[in-house]
Image: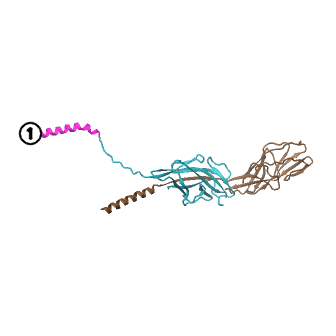
Chain colours: A cyan, B brown
Amino acid sequence: MLKKYISIMRGAALAALLMCGASLPAQTTASGVINGSLNNTSGIAIQFDSDPAGVTLGAAGTNAATANFGTVSAFGPLAAGVTRPSVTATNFTVRTIFDVQVTSGGLTSTSYTLTANLAAATPSGMSYKVDAITLTTALQTIQVNGSYNTDIAHNLDLVILTAAPGAGGPAVNTPITTTINFTATAN
Amino acid sequence: MKKVMLLTIFAALMMISSAAVAQTTASGTLTVTATVTGSINLVFNSDASGLALSSGAGTNAATLAFGNVSAFGAISAGIVRSTTATNFTVSSAVDVLVTKTNSASANYTLKAQLGSADAVNTWTVGGVAVTNAAQSTLTATGTYAANSNFPVAITVPFTTASGTLISNTINYVATAN
């Protein structure tokens, strides 16, 4: 009886092994399910673009661009894209034009407000204007009804005192760098 | 149980609301660089005692027209005339204004040179003979931001035929000291 049982078990084990061998090829295919989820949130983004009438921006198309006026003076030559709208006895202004593009997604807002401020106090003898608004370290409103998804040109003016260095004028023959922070807020 | 549900819904709404507000603002930075250099500028102005500049007063490209001049005939106001045995000289005051910016320079040097040779007439500026051969120094200590009179004079020989047009260009160069 025991021998018969063992024989049956051996047969069953063999059958099981054969079945396993037959099923191995079937396991080269696997399937699964992934549960994906997406939070569709609204938002806006800002980028700076070069304006055809202004200097070519560094890192144009991003939100951290650079504008280099090059060498500027009251009477000397200026770089392409830089103009000199005024020269007075006390100061002169050099100007370039840059574009701001604010894109929106998932918003009902139809326009945005653009504000700007200097990241640090102005260097000696210099002041900065965007669209004739003198910038300080406090936020200044530049535009209240900006349109989305299009380049909007803005004047960037550097007003430079004509006084000599040490007498109220700016340092000369050395690059003067200032960072302007811009913030666009959906209306 | 009902209160718990309401509180849960309220909290969820608050979270959605705050998230929406936060995402309606975008910021960027524009880094601006400029290198300021000193510069000077030269312009011509009419002097009150001389002829009015015909054109270009207040610029660096002016015209001084003496009009008809002669050794003994009538002469326009603003022209000073002197005569010798062989020639006559007409002169007019002309102001030169040099301004400086972003510079510690104390004064400037002013030089002048004729644009083309004149083998017949003699030209002087500020009493200094000027030719086309080389620059002549009119002053080595010019004062900035002040009209300085540098009279332009032409000495014409009596041998010059009546009706002869005398014309030349005087190139001025101011250099910061």
User: Taken as a whole, is the magenta stretch helix, strand or loop?
Assistant: helix
Position of A31 relative to A126 (above/below)? above
Q: Is residue A86 left or right of residue A183?
A: right
Q: Is residue B109 left or right of residue A118?
A: right
Q: Magenta stretch: residue A27 in it?
A: yes
> Can residue A182 be seen in this snapshot?
no
- Residue A112 placement (x, y as % from top left): 51, 54
The residue nearer to you, when weighing B150 against A47, is A47
Q: Residue at x 84, y 49 (%)?
A: B153
Three-letter residue code for mark 1: Lys
- Residue B5 placement (x, y as % from top left): 33, 60
> Can residue B154 be seen in this snapshot?
yes
Classify mark 1: residues with Cα within 10 Å, few (<14), some (14-19) or many (20+): few
Q: Magenta stretch: residue A5 in it?
A: yes
- Residue with the mark numbered 1: A4
Q: Which residues are magenta?
A: A1-29
- Residue A103 placement (x, y as % from top left): 49, 50
The residue nearer to you, when weighing B130 against B92, is B92
Q: Residue at x 78, y 50 (%)?
A: B137
